[in-house]
Amino acid sequence: AQKITQTQPGMFVQEKEAVTLDCTYDTSDPSYGLFWYKQPSSGEMIFLIYQGSYDQQNATEGRYSLNFQKARKSANLVISASQLGDSAMYFCAMREGGMEGAQKLVFGQGTRLTINP
Amino acid sequence: EPEVTQTPSHQVTQMGQEVILRCVPISNHLYFYWYRQILGQKVEFLVSFYNNEISEKSEIFDDQFSVERPDGSNFTLKIRSTKLEDSAMYFCASTMRGRGYGYTFGSGTRLTVV
């Protein structure tokens, strides 16, 4: 079974509009963390935002916010006021387990976001 | 801001050759990782490393792969005899306390096996 599911292979949005990228996850571990990364065409993985399973509030980082709905096991990324530079591949990822030890990330398939002028 | 540095950025190698991908993790980080991304696909975990030994490895990380921290700063991934299907982007990552927060990736090495 997929641990991270991103159901939108591609999204097209007009510049300055808000956009929501979907991510659902599957885990039975009470302690986990959720990440979003941006991968531009140059290939690097750029960290955007993190949400811990015990965090009471939704994470925000500038124009990025994470809509964390624990009961629904969803962690959607919201980008406000999209810009042309936001065009990229976006990956949702999860780490499972407690706070100590080396921990791998499990990634979703990604969503390719294209911002149109 | 501290960075994870990977070299080379691109490498082309002949099938059957050995390659070594190099990474310099963030200096106060303790946990190190390699991931692989075949073109157009998702990022996959290969191996994690802590205290000079492998913590966990995936099914992909077979006997052709090895990792090493030869000195206090470098972390390397060796592929002993490359195959065409090893062509991918390889990412190094490091974390400070293994929490997962502050999971920093390098910019990647694009390996092409011909």
Image: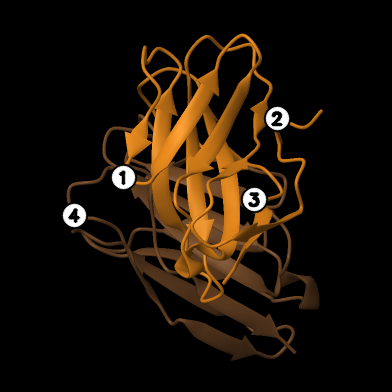
Chain colours: A orange, B brown
Residue A5, position as x, y percentages in the image: 73, 36
Residue B39's place in the image compared with B37, above or below, is below
* Left or right relative to B40: residue B75: left
Marker disc for residue B44: 3
Distance from disc 3 to disc 1, alpha carbons, whole Å, reads 28 Å
Q: Residue at x 27, y 42 (%)?
A: B30
Separation (CA) of disc 4 from disc 1: 27 Å
Residue A62 is marked as: 1
- Residues beneath discs 4 and 1 located on the same chain: no
Evaluate whether residue B51 shows in this view.
yes
Secondary structure of residue under mark 1: loop
Which residue is denoted by mark 4 in the rendering?
B27
Name the front one of labels 2 and 1.
Answer: 1
Give the mark, 3 or 4, whose residue is nearer the N terminus: 4
Name the kind of residue labelled 1 in the image: Gly
Q: Residues within 10 Å of mark 4 (few under 14, many from 20)?
A: some
